[in-house]
Image (cartoon, helix red, strand yellow):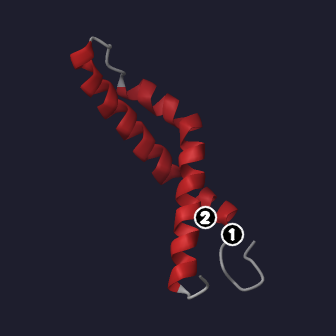
Amino acid sequence: MTQADGSWPVRKLAIVLYPFAAAAVAINLFMLSLMCIAFGVPALSPITAIWLSIPLGIPATWWTAKWVRGLMDEAEGKK
């Protein structure tokens, strides 16, 4: 599943990074809901934040994988 030059493609990086990105989305959603209490918005429960982070973690993971791939290319001198 690696590319011809031995580097990881964005898709493989995204699969590996998904649990971490989805967890970060869940934490940020929960913290945002706590801050929104000041505006009268009810807070999300931690379980609701986790459930919402499952689909919202996909675009976050893709952007993270593209960013990491760019950092890896830069470190290898490909850019």
> Is residue 38 left or right of 1 when viewed as pictured?
left
- Label 1 – label 2 distance at C-alpha: 6 Å
Q: Is residue 65 visible in the rendered structure shown here?
A: yes
Q: Residue at x 36, y 39 (%)?
A: 27
Name the residue furthest front.
79
Residue at point 54% right, 42% down? 57
Q: Residues within 10 Å of mark 1 (few under 14, many from 20)?
A: some
Above or below 77: residue 49 = above
Residue 25 x, y percent position in the rendering: 44, 41
Tell me what residue is drawn at x 33 percent, y 25 percent. 33
In the picture, which quadrant includes the C terminus? Answer: bottom right
SS for dot 1: loop
Q: Foreground: 53 or 77?
A: 77
Relative placement, left or right, of 9 versus 47 is right
The mark found on residue 9 in the picture is 1
Q: Amino acid at mark 2?
A: Leu
Percent coordinates x, y for residue 2 in the rendering: 72, 76
Tag of residue 13 = 2
Position above or below: 21 against 8: above
- Pointer 1 with pointer 2, Cβ within 8 A: yes
Quarter of the view holding residue 77: bottom right
Local secondary structure at mark 2: helix
Q: Position of residue 9 (x, y in %)?
A: 68, 69
Which amino acid type is marked by label 1? Pro
Residue drawn where x is 32% and y is 14% of the image: 41
State the image coordinates of residue 68 (x, y, percent, origin top left).
Answer: 52, 67
